[in-house]
Image (tube, rainbow, N blue to C red):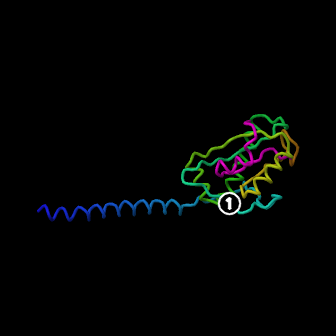
């Protein structure tokens, strides 16, 4: 009886290992195939074609399995916007980057979501600085979106108020924004 049970044990271990591996692979494949989709009738669209610089290959940005990612929001301090205005403009900028990357690099978006959705607010002193940072980001194929205000409340129409960069690996974003101060 002992001889028969000892020959079954290696087969049972192999079967168990195969089952666990199959479940893990199925889970990972299933998660990858569920790309977030935007509603077809989304009325609050951000125009992607009005950006002066090409985005580059947004799909080329990859993050390692445990690599931290973040989205940075660079706020112009020279405009003296109220906290409520800053919050609204940061929301617009965040959505602009998110909507773009959901279409062009959904794996990066999912990684950012799984790793905590870090968002950092930084200071800029002028529109010129925002434009320089946007150029640097796009050269590195990072998603970069600036918000141009409608001019209904505190700032003139068309004024660039906030620049969002990311989400992307922290090390890559820090190449562009590493010297900026926290808001």
Q: Is residue 30 magenta?
A: no
- Quarter of the image for residue 107 reads bottom right
* Magenta-colored span: 159-183
User: Horizontal and vertical percent for residue 178?
Assistant: 72, 43
Q: Please say if 171 is above or below 101.
A: above
The residue carrying mark 1 is: 41
Q: In what quadrant of the picture does the N terminus appear?
A: bottom left
Front-lying residue, 169 or 118: 169
Label 1 crowd (10 A; few <14 / some 14-19 / many >=20) = few
User: Horizontal and vertical percent for residue 173?
Assistant: 70, 49
Q: Is residue 172 magenta?
A: yes
Q: Please say if 177 is above or below 7.
A: above
User: Horizontal and vertical percent for residue 44?
Assistant: 72, 54
Q: Name the residue rendered at 79%, 51% in the picture.
A: 134
User: Horizontal and vertical percent for residue 76?
Assistant: 81, 40
Total number of numbered discs in the rendering: 1
Spot the residue most to the right.
Answer: 156
Q: Name the residue rendered at 83%, 50% in the picture.
A: 132
Front-lying residue, 14 or 93: 14
């Amino acid at each position: 009886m002992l001889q028969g049970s000892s020959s079954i044990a290696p087969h049972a271990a192999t079967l168990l290992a195969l089952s666990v591996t199959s479940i893990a692979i199925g889970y990972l494949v299933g998660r990858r195939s569920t790309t977030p989709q935007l509603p077809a009738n989304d009325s609050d669209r951000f125009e992607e074609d009005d950006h002066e610089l090409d985005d580059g290959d947004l799909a080329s940005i990859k993050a390692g399995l445990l690599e931290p990612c973040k989205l940075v929001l660079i706020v112009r301090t020279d405009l003296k916007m109220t906290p409520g205005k800053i919050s609204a403009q940061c929301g617009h900028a965040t959505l602009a980057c998110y909507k773009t990357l959901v279409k062009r690099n959904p794996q990066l978006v999912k990684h950012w979501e799984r790793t905590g959705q870090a968002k950092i607010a930084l200071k800029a002193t002028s529109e010129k600085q925002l434009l320089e940072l946007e150029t640097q980001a796009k050269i590195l194929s990072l998603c970069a979106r600036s918000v141009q205000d409608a001019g209904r409340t505190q700032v003139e129409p068309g004024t660039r108020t906030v620049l969002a960069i990311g989400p992307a690996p922290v090390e890559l974003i820090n190449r562009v924004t590493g010297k900026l101060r926290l808001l």
